[in-house]
Amino acid sequence: MSRSSIRAGMLLALAGVCGAAAAQPTPPPQALPPPEASHPLDTLLAELDDLRSTVDALRRALALAKLETAEIQRERDELWQFIQDHDQLGRDFEQYEAIKAATELQERRRLSEASREQHEAARLKRTARQRAARADRDRRRDQMQRVQRYRDAGFTPLGFDVYLSDAAFNYRTDDGLSTRLDWNGLTGHFIRVYPWADRIDFSSMTLSGSVLNASEIVRDIGIAVTFFDEQGSQVGGEIIQVSNARPDVPYPFTTTLDMALNRPFASTTTYVLYADPSDPAAVP
């Protein structure tokens, strides 16, 4: 007999009892009959269900234990690897720190040395510029003083450190005497003529002056002197040459030249043709 049949019978009996009790008066309370003994198969099935539940719980517990064991094993391996890496990399890190400190110290020394050399080079360059500027000022001052000294002595600079003194111009007269014309180079005209003569031979003129060399290396000098009339036409000219001219020594000259004019010249121009050193290799 199955458990469902038994339960159905028990329900029917209970329903009949309830109906009879409703039709009859309630009897006095009596002791309940002892419960019916369960079937052995039901007991086995219940025990089987309990065992199945226990097995499932044990399986879940075993799976959780395996997972925990794997996690613990992984953490142990990581910890062991960390200890090994720490022992090895810790020494490497100390060496790295030492090398880094030495490298930084060397770099600071190099930067300090480079900065010191840069400051020293800037100081030397600044000192050289100051010396060059001082030497240039001294050179210009000496040159100005020298030019002023030459001007005070009556010499005019022509360039290339060549100077020419104020020149004198002399003409012959018909009576065999001489007449001098004073020429002002600044204003560009004659100052006076003396002694005055009625008839002056302007076709021949004597030129007199001095050449001065102010250079230490120049020795051979050539100066051109040209004369013009009122229209700017050249009416005469002369080249004055001085060989082996020593510095700061005036070299006088006197020369007679023919003039293509029957009256005094109107203007004159003087310039340096050449200023050559005695030794070309000495030219800077």
Image (cartoon, rainbow, N blue to C red):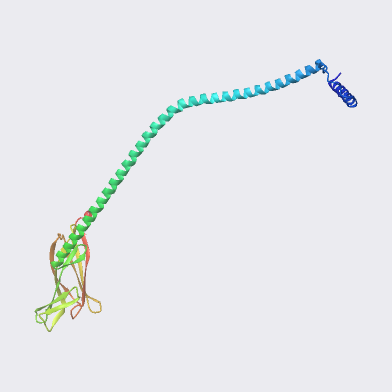
Residue 22 occupies which quadrant of the picture?
Answer: top right
In the rendered image, the vertical position of residue 172 relative to residue 43, given as above or below: below
In the rendered image, the vertical position of residue 270 relative to residue 67, given as above or below: below
Residue at point 65%, 22% (across, down) = 61
Q: Is residue 213 visible?
A: no
| Of the pair 221 and 258, the residue shown nearer to us | 221
Lateral position of residue 49 relative to residue 183, left or right: right
In the rendered image, the vertical position of residue 125 relative to residue 15, given as above or below: below
In the image, residue 98 lies at what x, y percent? Answer: 38, 31
| Of the pair 198 and 118, the residue shown nearer to us | 118
Residue 10 occupies which quadrant of the picture?
Answer: top right
| Of the pair 62 and 219, the residue shown nearer to us | 62
In the image, residue 110 lies at what x, y percent? Answer: 33, 39
**Rendered-image quadrant of the N terminus:** top right
**Rendered-image quadrant of the C terminus:** bottom left
Number of marks drawn: 0
Lateral position of residue 177 relative to residue 216, left or right: left
| Of the pair 204 and 120, the residue shown nearer to us | 120
In the image, residue 132 lies at what x, y percent? Answer: 24, 54
Residue 197 occupies which quadrant of the picture?
Answer: bottom left
Lateral position of residue 271 relative to residue 50, left or right: left
Residue ranking furthest to the bottom: 198
In the image, residue 191 lies at what x, y percent? Answer: 15, 78
Residue at point 20%, 65% (across, down) = 222
Residue at point 45%, 28% (across, down) = 89
Lateral position of residue 174 relative to residue 41, left or right: left
Q: Is residue 41 visible?
A: yes
